[in-house]
Amino acid sequence: MLWAGLAGASILLGLVGPFGTYDQLPLAARLAYWTAIVVSTYLTGFVVVHFAVHLLYGEDRGGVADYGLAGAIAGVPIAGLVALLNRFAFGDGSVFGFFTALPYVVATAALISALVAFFMQRAAVETGPAAETAKASPRPRILDRLPHEKRGRLTHLTMQDHYVEVHTDRGRELVLMRMSDAITETEGVEGLRIHRSHWVARAAVEGVERRGGKLLLRLRGGTELPVSRSYSEAVRAAGFG
Protein backbone atom coordinates (compact mmCIF):
# COMPACT_ATOMS: atom_id res chain seq x y z
CA MET A 1 0.00 0.00 0.00
CA LEU A 2 2.80 2.40 0.91
CA TRP A 3 4.80 1.75 -2.24
CA ALA A 4 1.67 1.97 -4.36
CA GLY A 5 1.01 5.41 -2.85
CA LEU A 6 4.58 6.55 -3.51
CA ALA A 7 4.38 5.26 -7.08
CA GLY A 8 1.07 7.04 -7.63
CA ALA A 9 2.45 10.32 -6.28
CA SER A 10 5.56 10.01 -8.47
CA ILE A 11 3.52 9.39 -11.63
CA LEU A 12 1.09 12.21 -10.88
CA LEU A 13 3.87 14.72 -10.23
CA GLY A 14 5.76 13.50 -13.28
CA LEU A 15 2.74 14.05 -15.51
CA VAL A 16 1.80 17.44 -14.04
CA GLY A 17 5.39 18.71 -13.85
CA PRO A 18 5.09 21.34 -11.05
CA PHE A 19 7.71 23.99 -10.20
CA GLY A 20 8.73 24.43 -13.83
CA THR A 21 9.78 20.80 -14.36
CA TYR A 22 7.18 20.38 -17.13
CA ASP A 23 9.05 22.85 -19.38
CA GLN A 24 12.58 21.81 -18.41
CA LEU A 25 12.35 18.02 -18.64
CA PRO A 26 10.83 15.56 -21.11
CA LEU A 27 8.25 13.08 -19.80
CA ALA A 28 10.60 10.17 -19.08
CA ALA A 29 13.09 12.44 -17.30
CA ARG A 30 10.27 14.08 -15.29
CA LEU A 31 8.99 10.70 -14.14
CA ALA A 32 12.50 9.65 -13.09
CA TYR A 33 13.12 12.99 -11.35
CA TRP A 34 9.89 12.97 -9.34
CA THR A 35 10.27 9.30 -8.47
CA ALA A 36 13.71 10.08 -7.04
CA ILE A 37 12.33 13.09 -5.14
CA VAL A 38 9.29 11.28 -3.69
CA VAL A 39 11.07 8.08 -2.64
CA SER A 40 14.26 9.66 -1.28
CA THR A 41 12.48 12.42 0.65
CA TYR A 42 10.01 9.94 2.15
CA LEU A 43 12.76 7.57 3.31
CA THR A 44 14.85 10.43 4.68
CA GLY A 45 11.89 11.96 6.48
CA PHE A 46 10.80 8.62 7.94
CA VAL A 47 14.24 7.85 9.37
CA VAL A 48 14.91 11.36 10.72
CA VAL A 49 11.42 11.72 12.29
CA HIS A 50 11.74 8.29 13.92
CA PHE A 51 15.08 9.12 15.54
CA ALA A 52 14.08 12.69 16.41
CA VAL A 53 10.96 11.50 18.24
CA HIS A 54 12.92 8.81 20.04
CA LEU A 55 15.63 11.26 21.15
CA LEU A 56 13.22 14.02 22.16
CA TYR A 57 10.46 12.02 23.80
CA GLY A 58 11.81 8.53 24.46
CA GLU A 59 9.19 5.84 24.97
CA ASP A 60 6.41 8.42 25.39
CA ARG A 61 6.52 8.96 21.62
CA GLY A 62 4.99 12.41 21.92
CA GLY A 63 1.78 13.80 20.45
CA VAL A 64 0.73 15.26 17.13
CA ALA A 65 2.48 18.60 17.72
CA ASP A 66 5.65 16.75 18.77
CA TYR A 67 5.65 14.81 15.52
CA GLY A 68 5.14 18.09 13.70
CA LEU A 69 8.31 19.43 15.35
CA ALA A 70 10.19 16.26 14.41
CA GLY A 71 8.96 16.71 10.83
CA ALA A 72 10.28 20.28 10.80
CA ILE A 73 13.68 18.98 11.95
CA ALA A 74 13.59 16.38 9.19
CA GLY A 75 12.85 19.15 6.71
CA VAL A 76 16.45 20.42 6.94
CA PRO A 77 18.19 17.29 5.56
CA ILE A 78 15.29 16.79 3.14
CA ALA A 79 15.83 20.31 1.76
CA GLY A 80 19.52 19.50 1.32
CA LEU A 81 18.61 16.32 -0.53
CA VAL A 82 16.16 18.18 -2.79
CA ALA A 83 18.79 20.82 -3.58
CA LEU A 84 21.32 18.09 -4.39
CA LEU A 85 18.92 16.27 -6.72
CA ASN A 86 17.96 19.56 -8.37
CA ARG A 87 21.58 20.42 -9.01
CA PHE A 88 22.15 17.00 -10.51
CA ALA A 89 19.06 17.28 -12.73
CA PHE A 90 19.25 20.94 -13.74
CA GLY A 91 22.82 22.03 -13.08
CA ASP A 92 23.17 25.77 -12.57
CA GLY A 93 19.57 26.25 -13.69
CA SER A 94 18.33 24.46 -10.57
CA VAL A 95 14.61 24.86 -9.87
CA PHE A 96 15.26 25.13 -6.12
CA GLY A 97 18.49 25.68 -4.26
CA PHE A 98 18.89 24.73 -0.60
CA PHE A 99 17.92 28.06 0.95
CA THR A 100 15.06 28.57 -1.49
CA ALA A 101 13.66 25.10 -0.81
CA LEU A 102 14.23 25.14 2.96
CA PRO A 103 11.11 27.03 4.17
CA TYR A 104 8.80 25.13 1.82
CA VAL A 105 10.23 21.74 2.70
CA VAL A 106 10.32 22.36 6.46
CA ALA A 107 6.67 23.51 6.49
CA THR A 108 5.55 20.61 4.28
CA ALA A 109 7.45 17.98 6.29
CA ALA A 110 6.06 19.32 9.58
CA LEU A 111 2.50 19.29 8.26
CA ILE A 112 2.75 15.79 6.76
CA SER A 113 4.38 14.37 9.89
CA ALA A 114 1.70 15.87 12.14
CA LEU A 115 -1.13 14.61 9.90
CA VAL A 116 0.32 11.09 9.74
CA ALA A 117 0.68 11.04 13.55
CA PHE A 118 -2.90 12.27 13.97
CA PHE A 119 -4.45 9.62 11.74
CA MET A 120 -2.25 6.83 13.12
CA GLN A 121 -3.13 7.70 16.73
CA ARG A 122 -6.81 7.96 15.84
CA ALA A 123 -6.70 4.57 14.10
CA ALA A 124 -4.93 3.03 17.10
CA VAL A 125 -7.68 4.23 19.43
CA GLU A 126 -10.48 3.05 17.15
CA THR A 127 -9.03 -0.38 16.33
CA GLY A 128 -6.94 -1.25 19.39
CA PRO A 129 -7.71 -4.06 21.83
CA ALA A 130 -9.68 -1.81 24.17
CA ALA A 131 -11.86 -0.62 21.31
CA GLU A 132 -12.44 -4.16 20.06
CA THR A 133 -13.40 -5.28 23.55
CA ALA A 134 -15.80 -2.39 23.92
CA LYS A 135 -17.46 -3.21 20.57
CA ALA A 136 -17.69 -6.92 21.33
CA SER A 137 -18.88 -6.53 24.91
CA PRO A 138 -20.41 -3.14 25.86
CA ARG A 139 -19.71 -2.13 29.43
CA PRO A 140 -22.78 -2.66 31.66
CA ARG A 141 -23.63 0.32 33.85
CA ILE A 142 -23.76 -1.78 37.00
CA LEU A 143 -19.98 -2.15 36.93
CA ASP A 144 -19.71 1.57 37.69
CA ARG A 145 -21.09 0.80 41.16
CA LEU A 146 -18.16 -1.48 41.98
CA PRO A 147 -14.66 -0.65 43.21
CA HIS A 148 -12.24 -0.33 40.29
CA GLU A 149 -10.38 -3.51 41.19
CA LYS A 150 -13.61 -5.55 40.89
CA ARG A 151 -14.82 -4.18 37.55
CA GLY A 152 -14.23 -7.30 35.55
CA ARG A 153 -16.42 -9.46 33.32
CA LEU A 154 -19.93 -9.71 34.78
CA THR A 155 -20.91 -13.30 35.64
CA HIS A 156 -24.05 -13.21 37.80
CA LEU A 157 -26.21 -11.31 40.26
CA THR A 158 -27.65 -12.68 43.50
CA MET A 159 -30.21 -10.95 45.72
CA GLN A 160 -29.31 -10.71 49.42
CA ASP A 161 -32.14 -9.07 51.41
CA HIS A 162 -32.13 -5.41 50.30
CA TYR A 163 -28.80 -5.81 48.51
CA VAL A 164 -27.69 -7.30 45.21
CA GLU A 165 -24.42 -9.20 45.24
CA VAL A 166 -22.68 -8.41 41.94
CA HIS A 167 -20.22 -11.08 40.81
CA THR A 168 -17.47 -10.55 38.25
CA ASP A 169 -14.37 -12.51 37.32
CA ARG A 170 -12.48 -10.12 39.64
CA GLY A 171 -14.57 -10.57 42.76
CA ARG A 172 -17.95 -9.69 44.25
CA GLU A 173 -19.55 -6.67 45.88
CA LEU A 174 -22.82 -5.95 47.69
CA VAL A 175 -24.77 -3.05 46.20
CA LEU A 176 -27.84 -1.50 47.84
CA MET A 177 -30.49 -1.62 45.09
CA ARG A 178 -33.45 -3.62 43.83
CA MET A 179 -32.85 -6.75 41.76
CA SER A 180 -34.97 -5.44 38.89
CA ASP A 181 -32.91 -2.23 38.72
CA ALA A 182 -29.68 -4.22 38.83
CA ILE A 183 -30.81 -6.39 35.91
CA THR A 184 -31.68 -3.26 33.92
CA GLU A 185 -28.12 -2.05 34.44
CA THR A 186 -26.67 -5.27 32.92
CA GLU A 187 -27.68 -3.98 29.47
CA GLY A 188 -24.94 -4.82 26.99
CA VAL A 189 -24.30 -8.27 28.48
CA GLU A 190 -26.39 -11.17 27.21
CA GLY A 191 -28.00 -12.94 30.14
CA LEU A 192 -31.25 -14.03 31.74
CA ARG A 193 -33.01 -14.22 35.05
CA ILE A 194 -33.22 -17.81 36.27
CA HIS A 195 -34.71 -17.27 39.73
CA ARG A 196 -36.30 -14.54 41.80
CA SER A 197 -32.88 -14.11 43.41
CA HIS A 198 -30.50 -14.90 40.50
CA TRP A 199 -29.49 -13.50 37.13
CA VAL A 200 -26.66 -15.02 35.05
CA ALA A 201 -24.57 -13.87 32.11
CA ARG A 202 -24.85 -16.37 29.29
CA ALA A 203 -21.09 -16.46 28.74
CA ALA A 204 -20.56 -17.48 32.37
CA VAL A 205 -22.66 -20.66 32.10
CA GLU A 206 -20.57 -23.80 31.78
CA GLY A 207 -23.24 -26.47 32.01
CA VAL A 208 -26.66 -27.62 33.18
CA GLU A 209 -27.47 -30.25 35.77
CA ARG A 210 -30.67 -31.80 37.07
CA ARG A 211 -30.42 -32.94 40.65
CA GLY A 212 -33.29 -34.15 42.84
CA GLY A 213 -35.77 -32.97 40.24
CA LYS A 214 -34.31 -29.45 40.28
CA LEU A 215 -32.58 -27.70 37.43
CA LEU A 216 -29.19 -26.12 38.23
CA LEU A 217 -26.87 -23.96 36.15
CA ARG A 218 -23.17 -24.56 36.70
CA LEU A 219 -21.04 -21.44 36.18
CA ARG A 220 -17.39 -21.17 35.38
CA GLY A 221 -15.49 -21.44 38.64
CA GLY A 222 -17.83 -24.05 40.09
CA THR A 223 -20.73 -21.91 41.35
CA GLU A 224 -24.13 -23.60 40.99
CA LEU A 225 -27.36 -21.63 40.89
CA PRO A 226 -30.92 -23.01 41.05
CA VAL A 227 -33.47 -22.42 38.32
CA SER A 228 -36.96 -21.79 39.70
CA ARG A 229 -40.05 -23.30 38.06
CA SER A 230 -41.34 -19.91 36.95
CA TYR A 231 -38.16 -19.27 34.95
CA SER A 232 -37.52 -22.82 33.72
CA GLU A 233 -39.25 -22.27 30.36
CA ALA A 234 -37.14 -19.18 29.66
CA VAL A 235 -33.98 -21.11 30.56
CA ARG A 236 -34.94 -23.96 28.21
CA ALA A 237 -35.79 -21.47 25.44
CA ALA A 238 -32.31 -20.04 25.87
CA GLY A 239 -30.89 -23.47 25.16
CA PHE A 240 -29.88 -24.48 28.68
CA GLY A 241 -32.63 -26.95 29.61
Image (tube, rainbow, N blue to C red):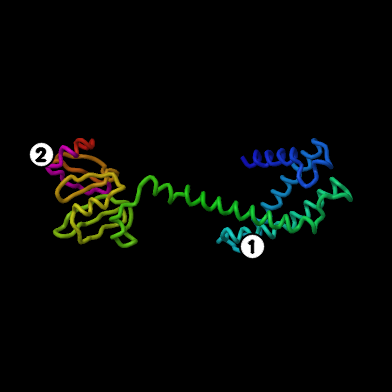
Which of the two residues, 58 or 230, is positioned nearer the viewer here? 230
The three-letter code of the residue at mark 1 reads Leu
| Residue 192 horizontal side relative to residue 211, left or right | right
Q: Residue furthest right?
A: 92
Query: Residue 30 in the image: x percent, y percent?
Result: 79, 40
Mark number displayed over residue 177: none
Count the labels in the image: 2
Q: In which quarter of the image is the N terminus?
A: top right
Query: Residue 79 in the image: x percent, y percent?
Result: 76, 55
In which quarter of the view is residue 64 placed? bottom right
Q: What element carries label 1?
A: helix
Q: Residues within 10 Å of mark 2 (few under 14, many from 20)?
A: few
Mark number displayed over residue 55: 1
| Residue under the image location 45 percent in, 49 percent down | 129
| Residue under the image location 71 percent in, 57 percent down | 106
| Residue 49 horizontal side relative to residue 61, left or right | right
Query: Residue 239 in the image: x percent, y percent?
Result: 23, 35
Q: How far apart are marks 1 and 2 (CA)?
A: 70 Å
In which quarter of the view is residue 210 placed? top left
Which portion, as a residue range, is magenta? Answer: 220-234
| Residue under the image location 15 percent in, 46 percent down | 195
| Among numbered discs 1 and 2, the one appearing first in the sequence | 1
Q: Name the residue under label 2.
A: 213
Which of the two residues, 80 or 228, is positioned nearer the viewer here? 80
Q: Is mark 2 on a helix, strand or loop?
A: loop
Query: Residue 224 in the image: x percent, y percent?
Result: 20, 47
The three-letter code of the residue at mark 2 reads Gly
Q: Residue furthest bottom?
A: 56
| Residue 126 horizontal side relative to residue 161, left or right | right
Q: Is-magenta flag for residue 149?
A: no
Q: Quadrant of the C terminus?
A: top left
| Residue under the image location 64 percent in, 52 percent down | 112
